Image: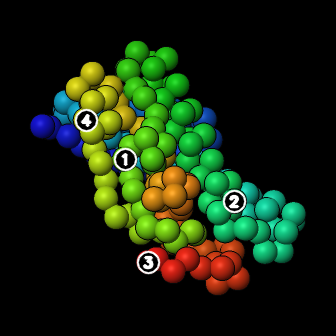
Amino acid sequence: MNTIVLKFGGSSVADNIKLNVVAQKIISLKKEAKNIVVVVSAQGKTTDRLIKEAQELSAVPNEREMDMLLSTGEQITSSKLSILLNRMGHPAISLTGWQAGIETNLVYGSAKIKQIYTDRIEKELAKGKIVIVAGFQGLNSREDITTLGRGRFRYNSSSFASSSES
């Protein structure tokens, strides 16, 4: 299977103009490879803004709810990019981390990937779609959204109660 996997960080997808640039890059690479899978971050400073807003509500927000909140940024980016690619005539589908089959351990805020079940991704690729996966997230055995941690933390994860599973 001729597949290219791309990752675009927050500054690459920071606004709709930059999303158009990313879409053009994806389209040009689609000519070279049968299958394209794209992993995207939240746009710009979205995650930082969400952390700040949560901390305005609670000095120590619940760790599960933080992961629920923080995962939304990547979901917004993935759906917007998919909308754009579809409008441009290139069938695409956005998937959350759990829809893409990313299973994590029980640690909130800095979960580790245990397994990736690629069935859904492969099914969508077989339909000729560009698959856009929301990065930074997965699903644990409790069926809770978990986030995979960040290059630089903006909140003090040690202030949250930690899970016993690593």
Disc 1, SS: loop
SS assignment at label 2: helix
Give above or below for 150 relative to 166: above
- The percent coordinates of residue 18 (x first, y second) are 54, 40
Which residue extends farthest bottom? Answer: 158
Q: Residues within 10 Å of mark 4 (few under 14, many from 20)?
A: some
Label at residue 166 = 3
Categorize mark 3 by other alpha carbons within 10 Å: few (<14), some (14-19), many (20+). Answer: few
Q: Given the image, on which type of amino acid does mark 2 rest?
A: Glu
Q: Amino acid at mark 4?
A: Glu
Q: Which residue is mark 2?
A: 65
Q: Nearer the viewer, mark 4 or mark 3?
A: 3
Residue 31 visible here: no
Q: Label 4 belongs to which residue?
A: 122
Q: Quarter holding the N terminus?
A: top left
- Three-letter amino acid code at disc 3? Ser
Residue annotated with mark 1: 101
Q: CA distance from mark 4 to mark 3?
A: 29 Å
